[in-house]
Amino acid sequence: MEEMVKLGDIRIMEMLEPEFFGGVLNHNIVIKEGGPSGGLLMIDTGLPGYLDAIENHLKAWGFSVEDISDIVITHWHHDHSGNASEIRRISKAKVYAHVNEIDFLRSPSKYDLSYDDVKDFMQISKQQFESTAKRINELKYESVYVDFPLKGGEVISKFKVIYVPGHTRGHIALFDGSYLITGDAVRGVNGVPSPPLRFFSWDYRLALESYNKLISLPYSVLVPYHGEVIYRW
Ligand SMILES: [Zn+2]
Ligand SMILES: [Zn+2]
């Protein structure tokens, strides 16, 4: 069951990807009122094709896609950037991403995955592997224009931008002193923070360094893009 959660001034819309390497993968898209351009701030945007689901979630909260004024993309992967261009076109939202992601957002590359890499981490058949890999690589993906390139250290609606490379070259997280939005730099696995998957990461050693940096922050609520929200009161 997809969930809609409101925690303080952070809202989370959960999208579900029903067939991801033999399991269900959730996506936690974060919405916050009071974006720098005056409307809603959206953090990550889901896979291409999620726009109707996004609109339905927003409607249930009394908003629409037109109300999105700012979009932060934690990294270029399709499940994070997939609807950014379409939303930007509809709502004139400004897009923010790290400078190191710009080339990948402009001309996204395919995932170069092999069954041998994946089977050590996931109990799946070759057929399950191939159907997911094929689906991911056949997604119709629009290139994304970045209005505001980031380096880390900027503040966006009280969120400080933290540069956490490793999963990708220009991955960022956002932290407001309480809420930590991690993208894929931290996963939530059964309520426990976990590092990114090795086979999906550009530089795993850096990814582990970034992961350790993030989980040592004094957060109250950690929102990973995949997995469950983690509370530490
Ligand atoms: Zn990713
Ligand atoms: Zn992801």
Image (spheres, grey):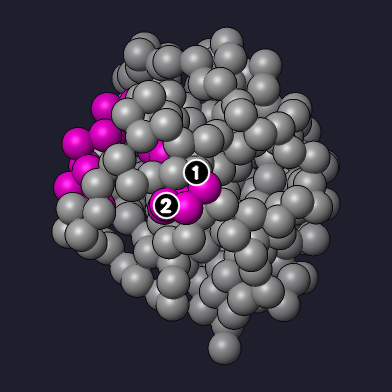
Q: What mark, if any, has residue 39 been given in the picture?
A: 2
Q: Position of residue 214 (x, y in %)?
A: 73, 61
Quote the CA–CA distance across marks 1 and 2.
7 Å
Quick one: 184 or 35, which is closer to the camera?
A: 35
Q: Position of residue 67 (x, y in %)?
A: 33, 47
Q: Is residue 107 shown left or right of residue 43? A: right
Quick one: 89 or 215, which is closer to the camera?
A: 89
Residue at mark 1: 70
- Residue stretch rendered in magenta on the structure: 37-58
**Residue occupying the point 48% across, 31% down:** 81
Given contact means CB atoms under 8 Å apart, are the residues at marks 1 and 2 in contact?
Answer: yes
Q: Quadrant of the N terminus?
A: bottom left
Q: Quadrant of the C terminus?
A: bottom right
Query: Does the magenta segment cover residue 61?
Result: no
Query: Does the magenta segment cover residue 43?
Result: yes
Q: Can see residue 77?
A: yes
- Mark positioned earlier in the residue sequence (1 or 2): 2
| Amino acid type assigned to the residue bearing label 2 in the image | Gly
Q: Can see residue 2?
A: no
